[in-house]
Image (cartoon, rainbow, N blue to C red):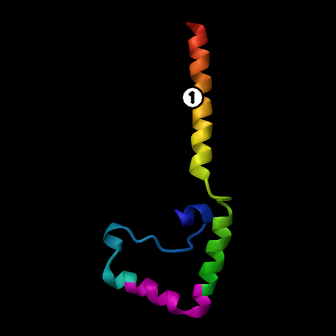
Amino acid sequence: MINLIAGERLVPELMQKELTGERLAEELKKLLDKKQNEAVQRRLKEATKRLGEGGASGRAAKVILRTVRSWKEKNESKE
């Protein structure tokens, strides 16, 4: 998900057959390199800033409730 938010491949997304002990160890070893780790951390912070403040699910729920209530009111007035 973070790669989609960033618009680039920041971290590997090892799924299903790609997630092997060998592959996981390979990726973890990369993070042991201090410069590479710092670069990844910096890019991750930039990407997470795009998400804004926390509470997105609560804000989304409020918008959905407003929309449903509005839709319900319009349909009830037609009856």
- The answer to whether one can see residue 7 in this image is no
Q: Residue at x 61, y 79 (%)?
A: 41
User: Measured from the top left, where is residue 39 in percent x and y?
Assistant: 63, 83
| 27 magenta-colored | yes
User: Measured from the top left, where is residue 32 in percent x and y?
Assistant: 51, 91
Left/right placement of residue 13 relative to residue 79 reads: left
- The answer to whether one can see residue 77 in this image is yes
User: Measured from the top left, where is residue 78 in percent x and y?
Assistant: 59, 8
Instruction: Say which residue label 1 marks.
Output: 68
Q: Residue at x 56, y 61 (%)?
A: 4
Dominant secondary structure of the magenta stretch? helix
The quadrant the C terminus occupies is top right
View extreme (top): residue: 79
- Amino acid type indicated by mark 1: Val
Q: In the picture shown, does residue 31 fall above or below 73? A: below
User: Measured from the top left, where is residue 10 in percent x and y?
Assistant: 57, 73
Q: In the picture shown, does residue 78 fall above or below 64? A: above
**Label 1 packing within 10 angstroms: few (<14), some (14-19), many (20+):** few
Nearest the eye: 41 or 36: 41
Q: Residue at x 33, y 67 (%)?
A: 16
**Which span of residues is magenta-colored?**
25-37
Nearest the eye: 30 or 73: 73
Q: Residue at x 51, y 87 (%)?
A: 31
Q: How many marks?
A: 1
| 31 magenta-colored | yes
Nearest the eye: 22 or 38: 38
Q: In the picture shown, does residue 38 fall above or below 48? A: below
Instruction: Write down the quadrant of residue 9 in the picture.
Output: bottom right
